[in-house]
Image: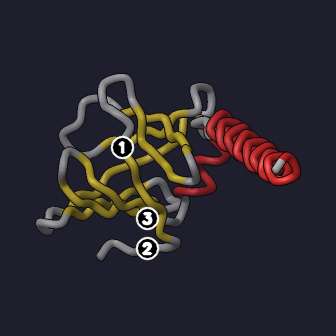
Amino acid sequence: MLFLSRKFGYKFMIIRNLLFIAFALFVASLANAQSVKLTSIQISEILNGNTASGKWDGEVYNQYFDADGTTTIIKADGFENIGKWKINHETEEFLSKFPGDIDWQSLYVMEYLSEFYWVSKTTPPTKFKIKIGKKLK
């Protein structure tokens, strides 16, 4: 009888240790999952010549960023607008301006768990995806 209790006791210890190690690895992975603010070079690399797609204020959009500094946005309802875009290398912000805008709109670009987000002081993080090339529809 003593032999059986020791046998199960060792198995319990092994299972307990494995669960502890798994929990420790899980906590460590959460600690490493931090959002990162992209640099101006990184922003340029992901946007230049590519299309961002997502939802802004509940509306689905596709926005293309041309190397010449123009940007074209098309929303799901067919609305199309052409504006300008650039990057402020000092503040590492993405800037855009469309007809009728008084000032440039500035946004940070963040990456979290391999997903991209537009972030500003006035709007919550807004997820978007990058499509390689011009994919407005």
Q: Amino acid at mark 3?
A: Thr
Q: CA distance from mark 2 to mark 3?
A: 6 Å
Which residue sits at x=53%, y=40%?
110
Packing grade of label 2 (10 A; few <14, some 14-19, many >=20) is some
- Asked where in the image residue 16 lies, by quadrant, the reply is top right
Which residue sits at x=39%, y=29%?
120
Residue to which mark 1 is pinned: 126
Residue to which mark 3 is pinned: 51
Q: Is residue 131 above or below residue 82?
A: below
Identify the residue at the far top of this view: 121
Tag 2–tag 3 contact (CB < 8 Å): yes
Task: Report the side of 31 relative to 131 (left or right).
Answer: right
Task: Report the side of 122 relative to 12 (left or right).
Answer: left
Tag 1–tag 2 contact (CB < 8 Å): no
Residue 53 image position (x, y, % from top left): 36, 61
Quarter of the rendering occupied by the C terminus: bottom left
